[in-house]
Image: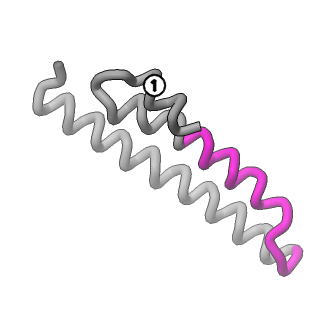
Amino acid sequence: MLTQSSHHVSYRAEIILSVVFFIASLICFIVNYSIDRSFSWSLFPAGALFMIWATITPLMVLQKNKALGAFAAL
């Protein structure tokens, strides 16, 4: 069972992880568009980052059935 402070820490870690993945995807989109004037290769790293985020987030958020949440995200 999580205490109030450990729940706050996991929530903060989830927000930080989400922001980092969003910024990485945004950088890929900006670089791809500035070079090619279209979104071609940037969809691959953005999709991969989304899949990693969708797998890791349930592990951090859910308190029970973490593995089931991670598999459900896929």
Q: Is residue 32 left or right of residue 51?
A: right
Residue at point 60% right, 49% down? 50
57 to 30, vertically: above or below:
above
- Range of residues picked out in magenta: 36-53
Is 50 part of what is drawn in magenta? yes
Task: Point out the residue furthest to the top here.
Answer: 1
Quarter in which the N terminus is drawn? top left
Query: Which quadrant of the figure has residue 61?
Result: top left
Q: Is residue 73 left or right of residue 64?
A: right
User: What predominant SS class does the magenta segment belong to?
Assistant: helix
Residue at point 18% right, 24% down? 2
Secondary structure under tag 1 reads: helix
Q: Is residue 18 left or right of residue 45?
A: left
Query: Which quadrant of the figure has residue 51?
Result: top right
Give x and y (percent) for residue 52.
59, 39
Is 17 part of what is drawn in magenta? no
Q: How is the image coloured?
A: one colour
Frontmost residue, 46 versus 20: 46
Residue at numbered disc 1: 68
Give x and y (percent) for residue 8.
20, 38
Residue at point 55% right, 50% down? 21
50 to 29, vertically: above or below:
above
Residue at point 25% right, 35% down? 9
Amino acid identity at mark 1: Leu
Query: Which quadrant of the figure has residue 5?
Result: top left
